[in-house]
Image: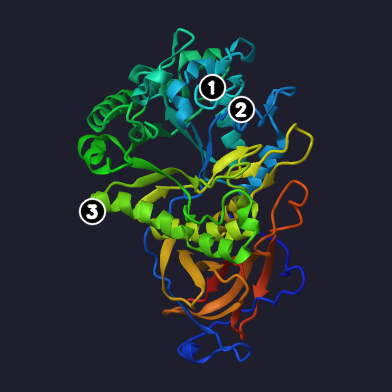
Amino acid sequence: MRQHHGDNSISRRGALKTLAATTLGAAAASRVSAADGKGSVLAVDPTPGHEISPHLYMQIMEPLGVTDSSVEASWDHARNDWRPDLVEATRRLGPGMVRWGGIYTDFYRWREGVGPRDQRPPMHNLQWGGIESNQVGTAEFVDFCSRVGADPLMCVNFESDGRERYMTAAGKPRSGDAREAADWVSYCNDPVNAERRVHGFEQPLTIKHWQIGNETSYDRHGFDLETTAQKTVEFARAMRERDASIRLIGWGDSGWAPRMAEVAGEHLDMLAFHHMFDPDDRREPVLRGERYRRDPTATWEVLMRAWEHNDHKIREVRDSLDGAEMPLAMTECHFAIPGRNRCDVLSTWAAGVSYGRILNNHQRHADVLKIATAADFCGNRWQVNAVMLPTPAGSGEAYLMPVARVMRLYSHHIGTHTARVSQTPDGLDVVASRAGDKLYLHVVNCQQTRDITAELAIAGERPARATAVQIVEEPMVEVSHLNSKEVMTERRIDLPRDEPWRFPAASVSAVEVSLAG
């Protein structure tokens, strides 16, 4: 489990109160803070529950053409390598998985992105516009994942998901069949694959996770459910013939999950769904455009409820399976709020706190949710990205957006199994996990202006010591390349034993408790 060691002080510009802590036994409920009278018990049963997947903080890299140059802006064409500032920023972020794909894979032919770079043909991005150079292909993507410590997830061309507009371009076929997908598995994973070895890679590239179908159900001009299910079986069989150990993900959104599980379930390891959502009131919007700046309190209230949309979507998919044991993969998830640069409000710390609640919700579904994200990966414009890339290269260093800062905080301080939080003070959103003799708490203070005091009670365990790493910031502070190292920074402190924990307003915290046994 990864640990982050940061500063030993906590501060909010202006005046912020210090976070303190206590370890309590049976008398916890009766002890409250004399300062504000709002103290209450944070009760946790530390018994290990469901296993937590290392892929709950996945990132998605999709070439987005002229819309948001997520790949072309990431590649240093002068050096023929990834931008070093992107690699460094991603190492700090520490994603467990990076996904290659999206709608782009409906017209992506993987052989155009392998072999000598000077022989790779450029291609028209049929969805997002512009030209993709194909300088980043399979080997480059796997290399990036290796550098940042992430597992690669590859989406295959699923016969263009049945969308005729992507099947041809300039008179040339763009649709890929099951044989092409199987050849890709062999290219990556077969130790003696001749095609890969000719390209200079003696050792396998090793991609274990593959997704079949992307948003297939979203397009009435694409495959219907029955066609998708049958073709998923065809693709899965062909791909597993090349490597039986791969983990396959089929498409299961829009009510498709039950039938997909029935027809193709034995061939799949997970079912995928996506969630792009706008939590705003469409009749009286608060967040769109620059409106979020006009009424910070209204903005805060809408963002604090955003997790409910996320929870509804996850429950909709898992409940449709009616108890069937089919793990789920939310391979795309982000806000979709209209704005100049797409979701401008997401550069604020208020959005960061909202993401804390959303990620807590993902952990609550960890019994079935095995892959999840809350952002696209990187780009130079869309605020839904986890990493922003000032362009041109050299005009500023890549930096982490609020969503990435919370992902980093959580993913670096988390256990291997869930633990149950049975009681929380009003205004706090808390989840717990455990690994060995360590208990981890992810704590969101949902109050815009009020600190909240809590006293910890752990059933059957005695804490030995505790530390906290947290982000405390004014809700309307926005991050950019001009201030990225000064705002939304992590602070780490050792927590004293004999005072209540005080969580500052609008804070997101990761608490690590060592159990004495």
- For marks 3 and 1, the one nearer the N-term is 1
- Badge number at residue 323: 3
Q: Looking at the image, is mark 2 or mark 3 earlier in the sequence?
A: 2
Along the viewing direction, whichever of 197 and 211 lies nearer the viewer = 211
Residue 57 in view, yes or no = yes
Q: Nearer the viewer, residue 170 or 274?
A: 170
- The x and y percentages for residue 393 are 75, 32
Task: Kindly identify the amino acid type of the residue bearing the numbered disc 3.
Answer: Gly
Q: Quadrant of residue 212?
A: top left
| Amino acid bearing label 2 | Val
The answer to whether the residues at label 2 and label 3 have Cβ atoms under 8 Å apart is: no
Looking at the rendered image, the disc whose residue lies closer to the viewer, 2 or 3, is 2
Is disc 2 in contact with disc 1, using a CB cutoff of under 8 Å? yes
**Figure coloring:** rainbow
Instruction: Identify which amino acid the numbered label 1 is placed on.
Output: Asn
Q: Which residue is mark 1?
A: 125
**Whole-Å distance between the Cαs marked 2 and 1?**
9 Å
Q: Residue at x 53, y 65 (%)?
A: 301
Is residue 416 shown to the viewer in this render?
no
Q: Which residue is mark 2?
A: 66
Helix, strand or loop status at disc 1 = loop
